Amino acid sequence: MNPHPSSHESGSVGPRKTRREFVKRSLLACASATVAKDLAAASAGAASAGATSAASGPAGQGAGARVPPDPVTPYGLGPPIYLADLDRCQPASVLATKWRPNRWKVLPFEAAQVKGVMLTAGQNTAVPDVEYSLPQKGWHAIHFGLMSKYWESRLQVRLKRDRVFSLLTHHNMADAKVNRRDIEYSAHGHTTTHFDEMFWKYVRLEGNDALVFRQLQVQVAPGDPRAVGNRFMPCWLGYVKLVPLTDEEVRALTADRERRDTRRLFATNDAFGSLSWLHFTAADDIRREIEPYRDTDFSRMYWEAGMGDVTYFPSKVGSLLTFEWMEDHYRTQDRIVGQTYADFRAKGVDPFRVALDYCHEVGLEFHAAYRVAGFYFPAPEDEWNSGGLYHRHPEWRGRDRQGRPTPRLSYAFPGVREFVLGLLRELAGYPLDGVCLLYNRRLPVLEYEAPLIDSFKARHGVDPRTLAESDPRWLAHKAGVLTDFMRALQALLREESRRQNRARPLPVTVVVVSSEQENYSYGLDLKTWVAEGLIDTLVPYSSEAGINSNLTSWEDPRAAEYFIRLTRGTSCKLALNLMPRQITPEDYKRRAHALYEAGVDHLYFWDTHHRNFFDRSWSTLSRLGHKDELVDWAARGRPPVARPEVKLSKIADWDLSYGTPG
């Protein structure tokens, strides 16, 4: 048996005039291709609302006209090559035709465009890496056909000549509105009877390349990481799809990668979440978090450095988040995080510096982010900061109107502000590109503490507790404290820039809440911060009050008008955060286009590490900096993004038309 088939799609691309015309003609070519017809049919039901153009369509287009779906990728739209002989992987000794410990199982299959032998790994055994040789030469788009059984399928892959793996996750989170925690806890039930084609990247193959496939293996139990009981993520890899790029496509791709006007997207990583469910054991695991941003529209990474007095870097001011002060953990994830940071310290690895250096290597700015209010947490996280500043200085805790202590530290006390500034000074010793204060978690940081009350009485002759919380004098007084803190930060950064011979002080980003009123109620005087040049980038977290991460943000661009007016004509950049974390490709395009049209220049994505799965949403998101493509998309009637699916008909000797429950 030689299951090495290929399937060819018709369609060609003529001489290039402009890049937009090239993309338009490529879309038409793709829409007429055989496989594209299948994709359009497969996606018609799910995307019928978006595919039917009415008032939103271009002028002259009749109501009810069918708009062909856009391809997931702008290049590599020609005849594909399907490589489905995965029983050719090496070493052959780790392949089997039965479920065996520490072996990949190979299964013959038949599908609509391809038949061959797939590669599978199960939940109960660890399998070693395998290599799959690629004799092809030249530029290609590389896709992988993945399906899932019971759990979402995951695949780690790299070129043998590269150092860092990419992690592809096959899921339906946006369509099914699945919570991100289900992915983290491996509780996301997902089964398909088709392959979803997931785009990886464009590569110039050299004729002697090989792909390295790795199972995602997460050690959750101490001892042997390959022992049963650890988390071995399933993998169902049907085929590798290569699409050769034409000379014209190569020229367009090369020019595209040289553009800087499209790099208007900002990414984030909390340095906790991925560690907690993937259990990093090597520096390359950190680099894997950053690899998806290479050759995308992202220009910045906001990597968290700490919260309150615990840090994600070896600090002399705070405490590295090893959780060594805890006897037990409520969540497995917390134990894994603590163990990860402790292990890195024992190996002499600074994970923060690893992330910084690799961001620079892939072309990203690196901004250190800090949660200003993370000094204490409710149960079961109530021991995260045991023995820390909150416990050592109960006199610095917040107070409500009745004088009762509240579970937070207040920036009304000079000691709290000085501690935070000391931590930020320590961070400024790294070769950063900026610092970021996260005011979008655990507010307020000012309430009715004695220093605030006494200074207000001295100035206004009245106790603020007798006034309404919204009294403008009281709000202005609170805001003055945080404005002075921001001024002190700028003075610190100017001093550090002189000491380090920097050309200019590190830029400051703040992530804030929903509106002028909500921010000011917490003491965040954005108008003064922008006017005095205290901040360089402003990121409103959501258009919805209350810091609810599950709500849709900026559905109506008019909600951003205050922030647009505030920053227009100033040196302060504005970046709006798109939430929730899982968004469909069409919704990404719709919201991004509307915000750009309203005058927003940059987009920010909280927890981007929960979005970069290499699915079609990520392929769309990672190009959202291309304003011109979004304008063209809207003019063409806002077509849906294709769902590249290949329907399965048979696995081994089982005809899938006989699939029944039980």
Image (cartoon, grey):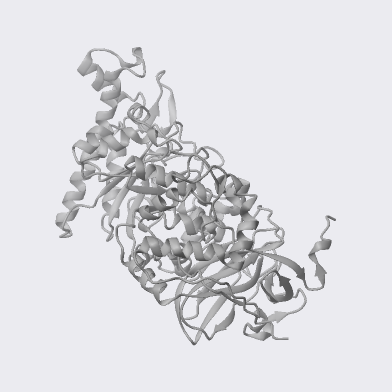
- Of 59 and 381, nearer the camera is 59
Which residue is painted at 29% across and 60% down in the image? Answer: 260
Percent x, y of residue 529: 24, 37
Percent x, y of residue 163: 45, 75
- Of 328 and 436, nearer the camera is 436
Which residue is painted at 48% across and 87% down in the image? Answer: 207
On screen, residue 203 above or below 373: below
On screen, residue 327 above or below 125: above
In the displayed structure image, the side of residue 478 where residue 616 appears, left or right: right
Which residue is painted at 30% across and 57% down in the image? Answer: 261
In the displayed structure image, the side of residue 44 where residue 547 appears, left or right: left
Which residue is painted at 36% across and 63% down in the image? Answer: 19
- The N terminus - image quarter: bottom right
Whether residue 572 is visible: yes
In the displayed structure image, the side of residue 605 where residue 456 appears, left or right: left
- Of 66 and 330, nearer the camera is 66
Whether residue 329 is visible: no
On screen, residue 151 above or below 474: below
Q: Say which quarter of the image contains residue 361.
A: bottom left
Percent x, y of residue 394: 39, 33
How many numbered discs, if any?
0
- Of 55 and 358, nearer the camera is 55
In the displayed structure image, the side of residue 101 where residue 420 appears, left or right: left
Percent x, y of residue 254: 35, 71
- The C terminus - image quarter: bottom right
